[in-house]
Amino acid sequence: MPELPEVEVVRRGLVPRTVGRTVERIELLDPRIIRRQSGGIDRLRAGLQGTTLTAVVRRGKFLWWRLADPDGVDTGEALMGHLGMSGQLRIATADGRSVDPGAPSEGPASDPLRHRRLSLHLEDGTRVDLIDQRLFGGLWTSPLVEAADGKLAGMGSPDALMPEGASHIARDLLDPAADLPAIARTLRARRSGVKALLLNQEVVSGIGNIYADEALWAARTRFDTPGDALSQRRALAILRAARAVMERALEVGGTSFDALYVNVDGRSGYFARDLNVYGRSGLPCKRCGTPIVRKKFTIRSSHFCPSCQRKR
């Protein structure tokens, strides 16, 4: 599932290729991809066709475009999206060819037509394809509301307005407005295991299974340590470790294990080669040599070093 670094890579790829362009038409190939859209395809077309994309914004794993009418006036709505488990936003030319990669990447380019569910056709011939094998993602319009703290709504936002559909999502650790000490206090006020808290998008957004495991390994903390057993210093160390590992992943295009996550140019990120614990069950810990353990955690699995991350 794409996590914060992967979605931010997508956002950065979309900015130069979509901002300032006008949506000419919408091509819907599978209605399931707009199941969150009130009023269905007719409402989506009415809200989008003829509008100009003025910004691409991200908070956590949510992306949205700001919209302006033909006179340049903000429409009061955003086109928001979520990539779910396997979603991709891919840029193609009018004849369906993928654009040249705009950032270092590696891995096989997946078929740009397979599992294409919806396309935005822009006035310059650019096509934005939403590809989603498992159909957990989607696109839909949402009215704008002001962020609860009155600060910039997210990465790339021109102001404090954000889609109502994402207003419940906490700020993420790469957001300049994120208050790490406050987030740490929230972790410490709860009895749930620290990994469950890191995955709670209403506590801190954007962190998924991969980066939670990596952050907890870096901070030498076991996944099931109760939040209320953490000191403020340790809670901050975990959050800073999560931020650091996501920044490193962002530098190399994110983490790809298969073709279900690719950048807008259709290429894979290569942070997977730098993972310290996730997906390394049975392999030696890079810090102490103890074999990494994989243990079931709710419906997921957690990877940790039983020596470096001892149960307290």
Image (tube, rainbow, N blue to C red):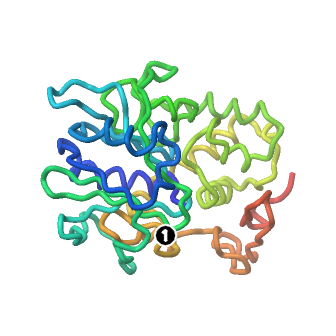
Q: Is residue 176 visible?
A: no
Residue located at (24% from left, 49% from top): 25
Res 304 → quadrant: bottom right
Residue 278's place in the image compared with 8, above or below, is: below
Where residue 245 appears, as percent x and y from the top left, is: 52, 56
Residue located at (30% from left, 51% from top): 26
Res 151 → quadrant: top left
Residue 208's place in the image compared with 253, above or below, is: above
Looking at the image, which is closer to me, 309 or 200?
A: 200
Callout 1 amino acid: Leu
**Element assignment for label 1:** loop
Where residue 186 appears, as percent x and y from the top left, is: 70, 31
Residue located at (46% from left, 37% from top): 39
Looking at the image, which is closer to me, 164 or 215?
A: 164
Residue 113's place in the image compared with 46, above or below, is: below
**Side of 254 relative to 201 (left or right):** left
Where residue 269 appears, as percent x and y from the top left, is: 41, 68
Residue 112's place in the image compared with 24, above or below, is: below
Where residue 224 appears, as percent x and y from the top left, is: 81, 52
Residue that badge 1 annotates: 260
